[in-house]
């Protein structure tokens, strides 16, 4: 079908993204309607079935979605002509169908890649808020860490986007009270011009497009018409009469066909995570190894506690109370991250901690795992020291959180998979006693 565009694997795209990040090149992420909460939504399909003469059970996923577009288009046109309140009723139904989705792993992968700096500008044709939910779960706060722009309502801050501020551009608006949106992508001339003016600021933009739909996303296809590179990921390739073919079918065009959003993002994230984190770990290892190599094991007598300040301080206070008994009359210090808050001397403070830390106790929660400060300045150096058998890590599961993608998944948690915040007071006291005894055995083996 293509003369110049190149088929690539997910692994090849992952390597390209890693290389682009290292070189400081920006990539715009386009999320089409096949990545949204309506695609593959059985509640939505069931609701649309009543307006269709076709039997949805005999249709493929793509055919169902195409049929839903035509139904919504017809209903929107009929409501505009006969029932002005019909659109509001339809919006209520859509809200109910979308609220059944609590969150999706594919959106979480996008959020993590945005946090790591692989993307800063996202153009979405979806009216749901699933991506914003994923950003929140990843520890990013709206307005502070990223901005959402409704192209139908908001003024676009071009300079902020050019400066690399994380931005979600909702091309067709948002499904929420007080916000404008278009169910079938029939955006106004003004909104279309706003989008075009924004894109004109990036004529050579490089775009990674996932889940584009020729009907739902038609009015936003201008995002994909670029002088830069276009990487196209979809279940099937665009039609021969598609406007985006010229942008795709050149020596810069690359495509992956046959993958849905979920599978593509899972594979992409896993490959990037393994490769990128391995390279970052090597950088940190190279920086810290000279410190580790000059240390004597006998110099390591202290306890280091790492936790998120967003979590309840009472658990740290309780731990220190129990530890104070075993370190009494000993030249042992209990370090907390409050002793080094970053700034220009953060590296010196980490060196001091590494020189004297024998046991590191980690209070693991979603706040802990999503803290960039903890990850960069505490956890990574401790993992390197632990791999060099200089430090012993004792992770505690403070609250339920996904640890399977964290480096800590290979460590045994002291309390297993029973979160500390779910234990009774009596069980917590028994647990603190166990932790104190374990730390004592590691620091003072002669007492045993």
Image (cartoon, helix red, strand yellow):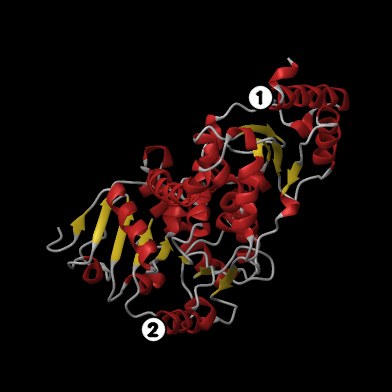
Element at label 2:
helix
Residue situated in front as seen by the camera: 382 or 138? 382
Name the residue located 50 percent from the left edge and 77 percent from the top edge: 163
What is the CA distance from the residue labelled 2 to the residue labelled 1? 54 Å
Element at label 1:
loop
Q: List x then y, in percent, for residue 211.
A: 38, 55
Residue where numbered disc 1 is placed = 416
Name the residue located 51 percent from the left edge and 39 percent from the top edge: 405
Q: Is residue 191 above or below residue 75?
A: below
Local crowd size for mark 1, using a 10 Å CA cut-off: few (<14), some (14–19), many (≥20): few
- Residue 335's disc number: none
Name the residue located 26 percent from the left edge and 48 percent from the top edge: 9
Residue situated in front as seen by the camera: 387 or 198? 387
Q: Which of the two marks, 2 or 1, is nearer to us in this view?
A: 1
Residue situated in front as seen by the camera: 231 or 173? 231
Question: Looking at the rendering, which quadrant does residue 401 occupy?
Answer: top right
Q: List x then y, in percent, for residue 313.
A: 82, 45
- Residue 200's disc number: 2
């Amino acid at each position: 079908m293509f003369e110049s565009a190149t088929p690539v694997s997910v692994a090849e795209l992952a390597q390209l993204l890693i290389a682009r990040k290292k070189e400081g090149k920006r990539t715009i992420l386009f999320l089409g309607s096949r990545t949204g909460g309506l695609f593959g939504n059985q509640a939505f399909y069931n609701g649309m079935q009543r307006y269709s003469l076709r039997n949805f059970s005999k249709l493929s996923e793509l055919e169902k979605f195409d049929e839903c577009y035509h139904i919504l288009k017809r209903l929107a046109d009929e409501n505009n002509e006969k029932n002005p309140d019909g659109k509001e009723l339809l919006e209520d139904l859509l809200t109910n169908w979308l609220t059944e989705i609590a969150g999706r792993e594919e959106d979480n992968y996008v959020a993590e890649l945005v946090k790591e700096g692989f993307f800063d500008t996202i153009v979405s044709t979806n009216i749901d808020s699933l991506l914003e939910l994923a950003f929140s779960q990843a520890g990013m706060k709206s307005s502070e860490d990223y901005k959402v722009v409704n192209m139908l309502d908001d003024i676009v801050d071009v300079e902020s986007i050019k400066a690399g501020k994380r931005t979600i551009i909702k091309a067709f608006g948002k499904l929420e009270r007080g916000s404008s949106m278009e169910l079938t992508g029939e955006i106004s001339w003004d909104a279309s011009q706003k989008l075009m003016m924004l894109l004109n600021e990036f004529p050579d933009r490089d775009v990674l497009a996932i889940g584009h739909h020729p009907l739902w996303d038609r009015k936003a296809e201008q995002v994909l018409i670029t002088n830069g590179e276009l990487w196209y990921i979809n279940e099937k390739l665009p039609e021969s009469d598609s406007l985006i073919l010229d942008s795709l079918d050149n020596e810069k065009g690359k495509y992956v066909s046959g993958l849905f959003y979920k599978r593509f993002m899972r594979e992409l994230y896993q490959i990037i995570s393994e490769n990128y984190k391995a390279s970052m770990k090597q950088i940190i290892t190279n920086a810290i190894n000279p410190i580790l190599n000059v240390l004597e094991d006998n110099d390591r007598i202290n306890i280091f506690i790492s936790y998120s300040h967003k979590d309840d301080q009472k658990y740290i206070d309780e731990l220190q109370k129990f530890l104070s008994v075993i370190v009494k009359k000993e030249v042992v210090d209990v370090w907390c991250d409050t002793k080094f808050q970053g700034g220009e001397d953060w590296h010196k403070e980490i060196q001091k901690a590494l020189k004297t830390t024998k046991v590191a106790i980690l209070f693991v929660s979603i706040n802990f795992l999503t803290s960039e400060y903890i990850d960069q300045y505490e956890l990574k150096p401790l993992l390197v020291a632990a791999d060099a058998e200089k430090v012993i890590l004792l992770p505690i599961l403070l609250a339920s959180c996904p640890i399977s993608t964290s480096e800590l998944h290979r460590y045994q948690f002291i309390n297993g998979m029973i979160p500390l915040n779910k234990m009774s007071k009596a069980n917590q006291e028994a647990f603190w006693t166990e932790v104190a005894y374990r730390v004592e055995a590691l620091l003072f083996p002669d007492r045993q």
